[in-house]
Image (tube, rainbow, N blue to C red):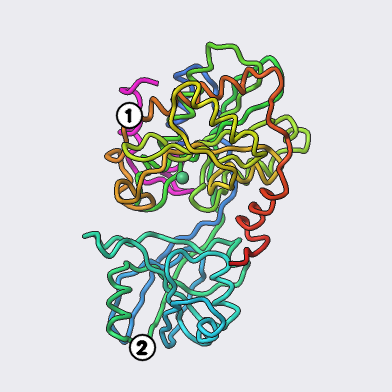
Amino acid sequence: MTIKKIRQILKDTAYSRTGGSPEELKCAEYIASKCEELGVKAEISQFKVDMADLKRAELTVDGTPIACRGYLCCGSGEVEAELYYLRNTDKFSLSECKGKIVMVDGYLGYWTYHDILDNGAVGFITYDGDANYPDRDIDRRELRSYVSEGKKLLGVNINAKDAISIINSGRKNAKISIEQEEYEGESRNVIAELKGDTDEVIVFTAHYDSTFLSQGAYDNMSGSIGLLGIAEHFINRPRRHTLRFIWCGSEERGLLGSKAYTDSLSEDELKKIVLNINLDMIGSIMGRFIACCTCEEKLVYYIEYFASEVGFGISCRQDVYSSDSTPFADKGVPSLSFARLAPHNTATIHNSYDTAKVMSARRTAEDIDFICAFSERMVNAAKCPVDREIPENVKKKIDYYLFREREKK
Ligand SMILES: [Zn+2]
């Protein structure tokens, strides 16, 4: 992939494209057109996602209106109660949630949501952004169905600066009012294939959707460009394995594209997939390159040796990566994710700062070259060397990641 082409794609896709939105469809069509340019046929495959049109969301604290965004899919209505800031999540702190609108730090995950729900919270407030940044951006969040499990609380997201001033002023009473229309919509994966000598398949994945405020240049148009680069690399080269490329939709909404895809496969189709190679965030100006292997540990050492052999800096580990590789591993497919992780003071994600400015087209091209070199070993392996079995310790981590089991802290 040329540096010029990388820059052009980043320019062409400099817009937010949340899962299920018309912009996501526009980007899916763009990626499909880039495949056709390479001479690879691509299809856009739809899957169902929860959607909501937010008509109104208001938060007042002691009568003062606070800028907010209502959570999508958290229901409609009004709730007024004492405001409680959940600083800790010990039993005592949680017991104080009863009958209150609860403010929580960070991201409202499955366990926190159920903790406050089980302890009688009647609404919630999250905050994001960075108090040290000049903007007053507020991200759009959603109450995911696999988090709420049908038990919905009204919730809003606010900027960190307002969260600080609410808590610092000792304000007591909160009122949340939300009106929205919830419906079923569609998101999509873009799928292309390069047939090999056998029908054993290596699946390459990268998500192309972004979060609400983000252009998603780094997270993850970079990986999407990577997939195009890999397709371009292999189109005129020998291939023992069949290569399948999936640009996943709605990853940012909880890996929905890769979950929909792996759920759609029969046992036989799944068995043919010997490996999943996922790209999520490569090519940043700053940062270290990593491989996260959700499979047997031997692959960690192989990649380390291989990288040394070709002269490429990397750190490898066996773990679960928060990306589209996980649903594959959960179905028993050995998976790995490649990423270049930038220090947070040089590039952040899921906000308006994730633009082409944090990217290096040259670095992206070099990262793609390495991934192609590694992939070539796997694609033309006489027999895929990675055990087609997920070790027990990794299965456990997947259970934690997918909230089937709670990790004791
Ligand atoms: Zn990502």
Q: Position of residue 4 (x, y in %)?
A: 30, 22
Residue depicted at x 36% and y 74%: 58
Residue stretch rendered in magenta on the structure: 1-26
- Tag 2: amino acid: Lys
In the displayed structure, would residue 108 be above or below residue 281? below
Classify mark 1: residues with Cα within 10 Å, few (<14), some (14-19) or many (20+): many
Residue for badge 2:
172
Task: Quadrant for the C terminus, please.
Answer: bottom right
Q: Position of residue 279 (x, y in %)?
A: 50, 36
Q: Is residue 144 left or right of residue 208?
A: right
Q: Which mark is residue 361?
A: 1
Classify mark 2: residues with Cα within 10 Å, few (<14), some (14-19) or many (20+): few
In the displayed structure, would residue 409 be above or below residue 319? below
Helix, strand or loop at label 2? It is loop
Q: Position of residue 159 (x, y in %)?
A: 32, 67
As for residue 367 lying within the magenta part, the answer is no
